[in-house]
Image: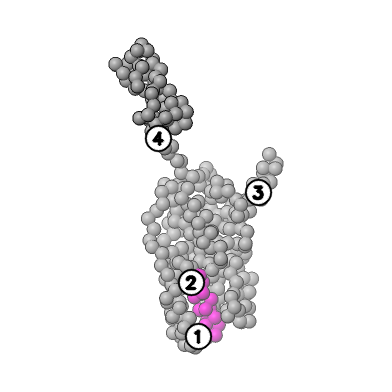
Amino acid sequence: MRIVSVLAASLLVGVTSYAGEPEIPSSAPVAGVLPTRRADAAALAERVARLARSLGPAPQLAPSFSLAQVVGRADTMNAAGRLDEAAALYDVAIEQGAHAPLRVAPSGDLVRALIARAAIGLARGEEARSGELLARALGWDPTLELLTGEDAPRMKAALAAVQKRLSSPPPLARDELGADCDHLLVARRLDDRSTQLTRVEHCRVQAQTTIGDQTSDGLALTALGVAPAPQKPARRPAYQRAWVWVTRGGRRCGARRRGRGHLGGHPPHHRRRRLECHAAPVSACAGS
């Protein structure tokens, strides 16, 4: 028993305890990964989607959208030194993405807009605005790193200052979840081997847990205070059941299944049935 407990503890990295019995949701939550440009974002998104599917019927989702065009135009303006125009376009992209962060695809464009707009803010003396933008980027992705071209000494210092000010990992703020946050299951990477899952109900964090890459789906769901929706067993065709009751001459007879998949090991239209009668003469049940 101690070995099992130690193993479970190693798989479930951290848990915010959920009080009460696990719930069985009426439908699957909207699931997704908070904006990031990590290379493993697609794999993480698939895992979260699988967890959500086990909780019930998938909800009707609004289509995803791309910020690539507007961010690309802003990048062009920025490279040309037209900072005011670039800042305005980045602000548009950030506003659109923040409204529905789980629907931005790829979400790396939103992260790039945050970083670039923060850099423009520093150049224009908008330290407070830059700090807000970097805090949001870190709230979505605590593993955020500056890329080549973004890592000017002033930007590195600003990011380090925000990281020092925030807790690790920073708590998810209400406005980081987007406008539609009634029923969510969101994920964000904390490092290369651990992921934080957050269950949100009515725009409030209901439960939160940190799992490792090898943590089972069942253990993760239990930590979140939910249970998979019960699966209805598929009804087997009549000829594949252990007993098939037939009526012959007003008497009930049972045909016993033999072999695999079919009575007598053969398809129904090729076999000779061997019937075991109940309260009927053998001659009444010796059908073909």
* 147 w.r.t. 253: above or below: below
The picture places residue 251, in percent across and down from the top left corner, at 32, 16
The residue indicated by pointer 3 is 9
The picture places residue 63, in percent across and down from the top left corner, at 38, 62
The residue indicated by pointer 2 is 110
Left or right of 134 in this view: 6 = right
| Quadrant where the C terminus is found in the figure | top left
**Residue drawn at 63 percent across, 50 percent down:** 11
Mark linked to residue 235: 4
The residue indicated by pointer 1 is 79
Residue 266, quarter of picture: top left
| Quadrant where the N terminus is found in the figure | top right
Helix, strand or loop at label 1? It is helix
Q: Earlier in the sequence, mark 4 or mark 2?
A: 2
Q: Looking at numbered disc 1 in the image, what kind of residue is underneath it?
A: Ala
Left or right of 268 in this view: 86 = right
